[in-house]
Image: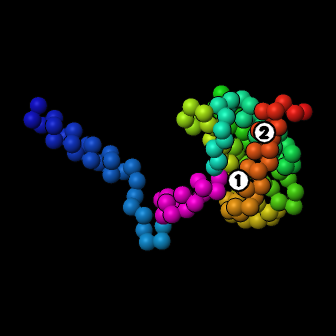
Amino acid sequence: MKTILPLAVLLAAAGLGGCGSIPTTGQTVFDSGGAVQSRVREERAFDTADRNRTLRAVLVTLQECGFVVDNADASLGIITATKLDTYTLRATVTVRPRGSGQMAVRVNAQHSLPGQSGGARPLNDPAAYQDFFTALAKNLFLGAQEVR
C-alpha cells in the first residue's frame, strides 16, 4: 500500500502535465478581454417563455435577412444559416431559457471573402447584430399579436 500511493501520485502528475502547455508571450488561450464585449454585442433577452415561438421568429428573421437555413435543431435550440453575397456570412443562433419568463438569444457570425486566406473571421460589427435583434423583436411582437 505504501508503494502504490506514491506511484499513483506520480502517474497523476505526469498525466496532468501532458494535458496542455503554458502559453508563450503573445499567445492567448482565451480572449477574456473581448468575451464580455462579444456577449453584450451577440446576446439579447426577450420577454417570452415560449421557446418554439422564439425559434420560429429567429427562422423568419434569418430568412428575411437573406440567409438560407442550413440546420435547425429545436431540441437544442440551435439554428445555423448561411448568406452568400460578395462574401459568405455564416450565423449560429442559440435560443435558451433565461429565468422563468425570458428567452436568451445569442447570435455568433463569421464572414469570409472569396479568395481570402485564413478562413472565416468573426463579425465584430455591432450595427449588424443590432439590426438582427431589431428585426427579431419585431417578428416576436408580430407573432405574439398573431399578425400574418
**Who's the residue at 75% across and 44% down the image?**
137
Residue 84, disc? none
Calculate the distance from the C-alpha at mark 2 to the C-alpha at mark 1.
24 Å
> x and y percent of residue 85 in the render?
87, 57
| Residue designated by label 2 | 141
Give the residue at the far right of this rendering: 148
Q: Nearer the viewer, residue 43 or 10?
A: 43
Q: Position of residue 27 (x, y in %)?
A: 48, 67
Location of residue 127 in the rendering, given as x and y in whole percent from the top left corner: 74, 61
Q: Is residue 97 magenta?
A: no
Judged from this view, the residue extending furthest toward the left is 2
* Residue 64 visible in the current orientation: yes
Placement of 103 over or under 123, stated as above or below: above
Sequence-wise, the earlier of marks 2 and 1 is 1
Q: Amino acid at mark 1?
A: Ala
Q: Main secondary structure of the magenta part?
A: helix
| Left or right: 83, with 24 as reference point | right
Judge from the rendering whether residue 81 lies leftward or rightward of residue 77; answer left or right: right
Side of 39 where 138 appears, left or right: right
Q: Quadrant of the C terminus?
A: top right
| Amino acid at the residue labelled 2 | Phe
In the picture of the structure, the residue carrying the numbered disc 1 is: 109
**Where does the magenta region start and end?**
28-42
Give the SS element for disc 2: helix
Q: Residues within 10 Å of mark 1 (few under 14, many from 20)?
A: many
